[in-house]
């Protein structure tokens, strides 16, 4: 099974998780951690490691972080070797939804790259976007 943990500075990860649940329903394998919240000045590493230890060793674990080079991403990247996690940074809603909704229990590296490329395509400067593609549908 896939386990997805969205981790961000402050509350972005909580909001993204709530938004995903709005679209996809209550997803039991979707988790979030808000770093540097409530006056905390340290990354909640114990909270993250505690969550990772709860997962089955056969689970494919994704840590979706907010900023490349940011402290959240740096800390999560240090866990790749010891916890065999897949760390993806620069997460957006399109990518997180794609990973959550993909029916596979495990994603190949090729599929992960494909989902990232598709998510990048969701970032559009609307002032120059072709009006023929506009729609009222979500």
Image (cartoon, helix red, strand yellow):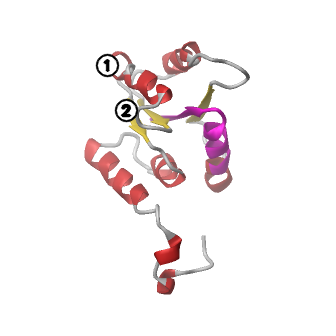
Q: Would residue 107 appear left or right of 37 to someone viewing this image?
A: left
User: Are there few (<14), some (14-19), or many (20+) residues within 10 Å of tag 2?
Assistant: some
Per the rendering, the mark at residue 81 is: 1
Residue at x 35% of width, y 23% of height = 80
Q: Secondary structure at mark 2?
A: strand
Question: Between 98 and 68, which is closer to the camera in this rendering?
Answer: 68
Tell me: residue 82, above or below residue 13. above
User: Which stretch did the figure color magenta?
Assistant: 1-19
Tell me: residue 80, above or below residue 126. above
Residue at x 63% of width, y 78% of height = 136
Location of mark 2 (residue): 86
Name, please, the residue furthest toward the front. Answer: 127
Specify whether residue 58 is painted magenta: no
Q: Residue 89, percent across and down? A: 42, 39
Residue at x 50% of width, y 39% of height = 66
Q: Would residue 15 appear left or right of 118 to someone viewing this image?
A: right
């Amino acid at each position: 099974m896939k386990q997805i943990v969205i981790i961000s500075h402050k509350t972005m990860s909580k909001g993204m998780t709530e938004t995903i649940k709005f679209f996809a329903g209550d997803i039991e394998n979707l988790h979030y951690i808000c770093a540097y919240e409530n006056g905390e000045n340290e990354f909640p590493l114990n909270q993250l490691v505690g969550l990772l230890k709860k997962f089955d060793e056969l689970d494919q674990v994704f840590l979706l972080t907010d900023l490349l080079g940011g402290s959240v991403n740096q800390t999560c990247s240090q866990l790749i070797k010891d916890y065999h996690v897949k760390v993806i940074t620069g997460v957006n809603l399109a990518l997180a939804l794609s990973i959550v909704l993909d029916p596979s229990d495990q994603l190949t590296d090729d599929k992960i790259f494909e989902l990232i490329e598709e998510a990048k395509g969701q970032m559009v400067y609307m002032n120059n976007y072709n009006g023929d593609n506009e729609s009222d549908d979500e």
